[in-house]
Image (cartoon, grey):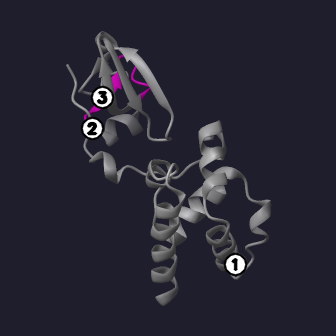
């Protein structure tokens, strides 16, 4: 069977992710965009199938933690919206201020959910996956983000 944390691919080559859990013949994975799926174990492999897209084949040679995590609007799920809503308001305001000081940036409020999460991750140095992990502990998430925000202001 598969191990938690192991990178796996669906046999169609279009989906891949990291194993979160195994329950009998069901394997629960998290895709790079944060979406969670489950499949019968027989439909998954630890090697990218020949049908895999070039991006999925390239990801096979890169450790999971190093895969590009830039979100786009089509990636957004209700879970992303929920996590964004749990980010401490002071952190969101600080990130908005940093963003709006950039030349030709516009208003932070005009950004979509994906753009806001990407910007928050960039400025606080806290990736979305970590935000989601700490979403049930907003105090700890705020501390992580506050440290990252303070560090980004030093440079």
x, y percent for residue 91: 61, 70
Q: Which residue is mark 1?
A: 97
Q: Is residue 75 left or right of residue 68?
A: right
Q: Which residue is pictured at 78% across the width and 71% down the height?
A: 106
Q: Nearer the viewer, residue 91 or 107?
A: 91
Asked whether residue 121 is in view, the answer is yes
Residue at 46% from the left image edge and 51% from the top image edge: 69
- Residue 47, compared with residue 56, is above or below; it is above
Front-most of 72 and 23?
23
- Spatial distance from mark 2 to mark 1, Cα to Cα? 36 Å
- Would you say residue 52 is visible in this rendering? no
Q: Quadrant of the N terminus?
A: top left
Contact, mark 1 vs mark 3 (Cβ under 8 Å): no
Q: Residues within 10 Å of mark 3 (few under 14, many from 20)?
A: many
What residue is shown with label 2? 5
Sequence-earlier tag: 2 or 1: 2
**Percent from the top left, x then y, of residue 144?**
45, 68
User: SS class of the residue under badge 2?
Assistant: loop
Give the mark nearest the N terminus, 1 or 3: 3
The residue at the point 24 percent across, 27 percent down is 47
**Magenta residues: mostly which secondary structure?**
loop
Q: Nearer the viewer, mark 1 or mark 3?
A: 1
Disc assigned to residue 8: 3
Q: Position of residue 65 (x, y in %)?
A: 32, 51
Residue 129 is situated, as x and y percent measured from the top left of the image, at 45, 49
Q: Which residues are magenta?
A: 5-15
Crowd rating for badge 2 (residues with CA inside 10 Å; few <14, some 14–19, many 20+): some
Indicate yes or no whether the magenta region holds residue 154. Answer: no
Q: Foreground mark, 2 or 3?
A: 2
* Residue 108 in the image: above or below residue 151: above
Real-space CA distance between mark 2 and mark 3, rounded to the nearest whole angstrom: 9 Å
């Amino acid at each position: 069977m598969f191990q938690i944390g192991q990178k796996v691919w669906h046999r169609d080559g279009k989906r891949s992710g990291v194993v979160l859990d195994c329950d009998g013949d069901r394997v629960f994975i998290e895709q790079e965009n944060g979406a969670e799926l489950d499949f019968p174990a027989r439909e998954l492999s630890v090697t990218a199938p020949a049908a895999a897209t070039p991006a999925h084949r390239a990801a096979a040679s890169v450790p999971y933690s190093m895969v590009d995590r830039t979100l786009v609007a089509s990636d957004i799920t209700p879970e992303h919206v929920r996590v964004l809503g749990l980010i401490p308001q002071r952190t969101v305001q600080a990130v908005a201020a940093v963003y709006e000081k950039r030349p030709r940036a516009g208003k932070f409020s005009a950004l979509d959910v994906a753009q806001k999460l990407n910007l928050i991750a960039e400025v606080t140095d806290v990736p979305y996956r970590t935000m989601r992990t700490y979403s049930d502990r907003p105090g700890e998430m705020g501390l992580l983000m506050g440290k990252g925000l303070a560090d980004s202001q030093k440079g």
